[in-house]
């Protein structure tokens, strides 16, 4: 496998954003993954009663009071996005969250949707929120906005078109639903739209908000939910998943255009595939070895990647006896076919062990994890893993599970390659193959300096910031300052380029810096 870029087939990941249990942004998410942080919350009886749960429910001997909580899920700047307070009160909470996430992903990519000639597609998914829709339609706010508009605002299926309307996105825009694989399928759909020329940029992702968030589940043997409140993927003591809330979005672009515009590239998407198990399984909710193996094989073929070149797989990893066994058998079927694959050469991971099962957002969480692992050259640890499920035969397989963060060096003459799986109840499977960007090959999590690529000590960089008011601008600068302190590597050119491409608001400030990182405020009129 060479590092050759296929301009007609490869897709660049040029931006991302996400919020997950225990992580308000991508930087915190990556830090938690490296440190092995369990983002799941455990609740007291008092907290559950205050959240409206029945005492009989929470007093049941098999009730497990845990859930992955998304902090600040009720915050929404309605005026920023052009919504009245009445409209915002009716808007599906998942749409509120996703609108902010899409905006942040576009900012991360340095894309101003208001600039003309930018054909941006939007591909999103969300979990079912029938109770919210019913509650919203009975609200007195319906009279203030009108019945028809209220029905759209309260409907999670209108999410993509509502966001496209408010942000001015003119490419294909639709909301999809394939259960747990929803958000990874959305990435595949975005790729297909880019390759067919329907759009020039594509934002893909998903959201899952489980209300009330102070919640738990009742364990039933052999079902989806964990007995001990831990998600132990591929472990001998696995009993199921913990569930939670979260969301993420990525910005994609045809690789040739990203290179031409000097876009910072997080990773290269080499190939993707989706399919359905059909009738190749014992029941509607059961997975299929053949279906999963087929989708993995197809994605590898599209990527023109041999299984032996894959170093790390972000698995679906639900920690259920049936689910883990089927997924492992499908992986073995594909990877054992590679003659050059030895024993214990490819790491397996599951982000569900950190943040729980995020339902419609599960796939995008795994995708963002893999993108970061590839970019920074570190394989995060699998949480709660003590000994392998003896039914899997892990020791004699091509796979292994690391319980500590480990360096992920590029193989001799080759770049880092990883893959992501997501499988939905109902049988829709998705698999995506990602490769390290050759333009970020010098970045690693172990870097202790902040080199300026190219080494031009006389280079001057401009860092513009803007917001709708001074208070927002001050918060933005504080956030950026906090982020800068945490960076072990900083590409000044990439940062300057991204900031200069963002949407420009009326309240502005600019900083300038040289290649050494010495920075000062540019005392001048607002920049243009």
Image: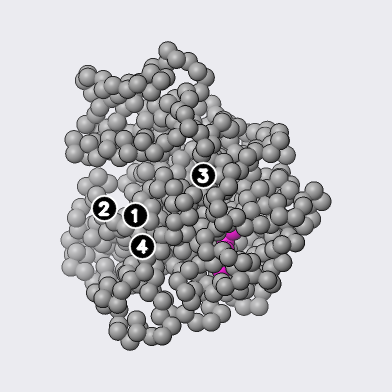
Q: Quadrant of the N terminus?
A: top right
Q: Secondary structure at mark 1?
A: helix
Q: In the rendered structure, which segment of residues is drawn in magenta?
A: 315-319
| Residue at horizontal 35 percent and vertical 59 percent from the top | 70
Depth check, mark 2 against mark 4: the one in front is: 4
Residue 251 location (% of width, % of height): 47, 42
| Residue at horizontal 29 percent and vertical 56 percent from the top | 72
Label 3 belongs to which residue? 372
Please tell me which of labels 3 and 1 falls first in the chain. Answer: 1
Residue 17 visible to an observer of this rendering: no
The reply to whether the C-beta atoms of the residues labelled 1 and 4 are less than 8 Å apart is: no
Left-right relation of 334 to 387 = right
Please tell me which of labels 1 and 4 falls first in the chain. Answer: 4
User: Mark number for residue 76?
Assistant: 2
Other-residue count near label 2 (Cα within 10 Å), few / some / many at <14 / 14–19 / ≥20: some
User: Mark number for residue 97?
Assistant: 1
The reply to whether the C-beta atoms of the residues labelled 3 and 1 are less than 8 Å apart is: no
Left-right relation of 140 to 426 = left
Quadrant housing residue 374: top right
The reply to whether the C-beta atoms of the residues labelled 1 and 2 are less than 8 Å apart is: yes
Q: Is residue 33 above or below residue 259?
A: below
Residue 207 location (% of width, % of height): 41, 58
Please tell me which of labels 1 and 2 falls first in the chain. Answer: 2
Quadrant housing residue 436: top right
Residue 1 visible to an observer of this rendering: yes
Other-residue count near label 3 (Cα within 10 Å), few / some / many at <14 / 14–19 / ≥20: many
């Amino acid at each position: 496998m060479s590092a050759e870029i296929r301009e007609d087939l490869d897709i660049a990941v040029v931006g991302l954003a996400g919020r997950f249990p225990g992580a308000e942004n991508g930087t915190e998410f990556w830090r938690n993954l490296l440190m092995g942080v369990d983002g799941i919350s455990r609740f007291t009886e008092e907290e559950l009663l205050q959240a409206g749960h029945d005492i009989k429910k929470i007093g049941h001997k098999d009730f497990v009071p845990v859930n992955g909580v998304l902090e600040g899920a009720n915050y929404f700047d309605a005026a920023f996005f052009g919504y009245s307070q009445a409209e915002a009160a009716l808007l599906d909470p998942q749409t509120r969250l996703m609108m902010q996430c899409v905006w942040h992903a576009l900012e991360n990519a340095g894309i101003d949707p208001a600039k003309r000639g930018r054909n941006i597609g939007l591909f999103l998914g969300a979990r079912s929120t029938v109770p919210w829709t019913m509650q919203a339609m009975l609200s007195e706010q319906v009279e203030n906005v009108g019945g028809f508009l209220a029905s759209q605002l309260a409907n999670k299926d209108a999410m993509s078109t509502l966001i496209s309307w408010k942000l001015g996105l003119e490419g294909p825009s639709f909301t999809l639903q394939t259960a747990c694989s929803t958000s990874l399928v959305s990435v595949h759909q975005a790729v297909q739209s880019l390759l067919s020329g329907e759009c020039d940029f594509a934002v893909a992702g998903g959201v899952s908000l489980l209300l009330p968030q102070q919640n738990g589940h009742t364990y039933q043997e052999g079902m989806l939910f964990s007995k001990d409140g831990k998600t132990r993927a591929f472990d001998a003591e696995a009993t199921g998943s913990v569930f939670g809330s979260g969301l993420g979005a990525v910005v994609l672009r045809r690789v040739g255009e990203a290179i031409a515009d000097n876009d910072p590239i997080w990773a290269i998407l080499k190939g993707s595939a989706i399919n359905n198990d059909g009738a190749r399984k014992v029941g509607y909710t059961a997975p299929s070895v053949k279906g999963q193996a087929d989708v993995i094989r197809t994605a590898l073929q599209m990527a023109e990647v041999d299984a032996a070149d894959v170093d790390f797989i972000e698995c679906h990893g639900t920690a259920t006896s049936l689910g883990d066994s089927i997924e492992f058998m499908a992986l073995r079927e594909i990877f054992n076919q590679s003659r050059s694959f030895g024993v214990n050469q490819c790491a397996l991971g599951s982000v569900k062990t950190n943040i729980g099962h995020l339902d419609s957002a599960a796939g995008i969480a795994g995708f963002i994890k893999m993108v970061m692992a590839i970019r920074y050259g570190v394989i995060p640890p699998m949480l709660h893993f003590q000994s392998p499920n003896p039914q899997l035969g892990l020791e004699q397989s091509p796979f292994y599970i690391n319980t500590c963060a480990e360096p992920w060096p590029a193989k001799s003459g080759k770049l880092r390659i990883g893959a992501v799986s997501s499988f939905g109840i109902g049988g829709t499977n998705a698999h995506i193959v990602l490769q390290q960007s050759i333009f970020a090959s010098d970045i690693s999590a172990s870097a202790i300096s902040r080199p300026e690529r190219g080494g031009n000590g006389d280079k001057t960089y401009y860092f513009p910031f803007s917001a709708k008011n001074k208070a927002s601008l001050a918060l933005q600068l504080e956030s950026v300052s906090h982020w800068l302190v945490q960076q072990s590597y900083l590409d000044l050119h990439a940062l300057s380029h991204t900031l200069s491409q963002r949407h420009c608001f009326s309240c502005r400030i600019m900083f300038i810096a040289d290649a050494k990182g010495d920075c000062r405020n540019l005392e001048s009129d607002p920049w243009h």
